[in-house]
Amino acid sequence: MEFFQHVVIIGVGLIGGSMGLALRRAGYSGRIVGVSREKTVATAVELGAIESGYTYEQIEEALPGADLVVMCTPIQHILDYLPRVLETVDPGTLVTDVGSTKRRIVETAADVGRDDAFFIGGHPMAGSEKSGVNAADPFLFQNAIHILVPDDKAPQEHHQALRELLRGIGARVMELSADEHDTVVAAISHLPQLMATSLVEMVGRMDEQAGDGHFLSLAAGGFRDLTRIASSSFPMWRDICATNSDRIEAMIAQFVATLRVVGGNVGSEVLEQDFDFANRVRDTIPRDAKGFIHKLSEILVVAEDRPGVIAEIAGALAALEVNINDIEVMKVREGEGGTLRLGFDHEEAAERALAILNDLGHRARRP
Ligand code: NAP
């Protein structure tokens, strides 16, 4: 982590602010300087995300002396500022970013053509529906996959140092080419966003036309769960769609074709094969929302319906230093309690948790 002694974060919002807080929390002792609007800089200093800051107009003053620059503004802003940043930084400086699409950003960096300052693109698969530095969270990157796009021009020691820094703040580093990244995120993030948006739009318009509110009043269960991301705010998605439109369009076409095939099976026994396949595949998807690279080791605990039961379970494990990496309340019915799914980083931790909770009289088992 100490390979870098002077970090500059450009755009101290949710991701940039969280980066600063996470570095400090992880014990990083070098300088952390921000570049943002004056008001944002003041808030970020107050929150401890950065120690001092500059405005965008002063960006040239902020960069000398930096050995790592992390660009955390919206994608279009990264594209606009990246050439200036790469041209201004000292020789040997590593620049990275957190933008949600990678091809355009990586191409923009390569076009600068500087060979004594380096760029390694990045994308933390962590976020929140909130934005701005006030929503910054030192734990945001914990257990979250952070994709890096390796670059041959950047020395191995810079790759290694960046990986170490990210691991230091709890991230799980995965390397992909920009091309692979943009295809995968088109399938698992961009297509679902547009599906949720269009599904809610379709049902919302039907509800408006019917005028009796029946569609939406009955949508509280599965429909609401499935379409949670339809609440995403547009500005970030405008940039994502603008910089990955070819992959998104291809993914939509593929989805429409699949929907037609599955739709064609409606009313036939063959539909069962679609369900079987989807059931099997979905079971293999890591459950953690942040996308664990390796699956967590899990246990299931039956929790009685009484105040403090979750605190009791978590407290018992914490007292014996067993760290819970993920927790999900699977089903709760009033008066009947529910089942908690606890995820652990290692098999050994899961086994210890099982023993501890069973000793305390909780009904715990492996799934
Ligand atoms: P955010 O909370 O809105 O922060 C963005 C920061 O960029 C703001 O603090 C703002 O700082 C600055 N900024 C400069 N020009 C801006 C403009 N035209 N519009 C809005 N803000 C501007 O957003 P974020 O969630 O941290 O996202 C930042 C980057 O992370 C984006 O590139 C996004 O693709 C990527 N990302 C986001 C998520 C997520 O779920 N949120 C996940 C992974 C990656 P000032 O206040 O100083 O203007």
Image: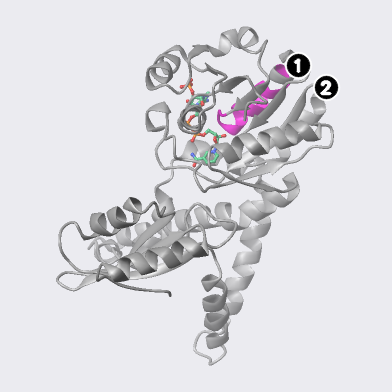
Specify start and end residues of the magenta stretch as a single range.
72-84
The picture places residue 15, in percent across and down from the top left corner, at: 50, 33
Q: Please indicate, yes or no, whether residue 279 appears anywhere in the rendered image.
A: yes
Front one among 246 and 339: 339
Asked where in the image residue 225 lies, by quadrant, the reply is: bottom left
Q: Disc 2 marks which residue?
A: 114
- As shown in the figure, which amino acid type bears the numbered disc 1? Glu
Q: Is residue 220 magenta?
A: no
Task: Tell me the residue at 46%/53% (across/down).
Answer: 197
Q: Are marks 2 and 1 in contact (CB under 8 Å)?
A: yes
**Residue 87 circle label:** 1
Front one among 152 and 304: 304
Q: What is the secondary structure assignment of the residue under circle 2?
A: loop
Name the outermost residue toward the bottom: 269
Task: Give the vertical position of 267 relative to 63 (above or below).
Answer: below
The picture places residue 367, in percent across and down from the top left corner, at: 43, 75
Give the Cα distance between marks 2 and 1.
7 Å
Q: Is residue 344 left or right of residue 95?
A: left
The picture places residue 342, in percent across and down from the top left corner, at: 39, 62
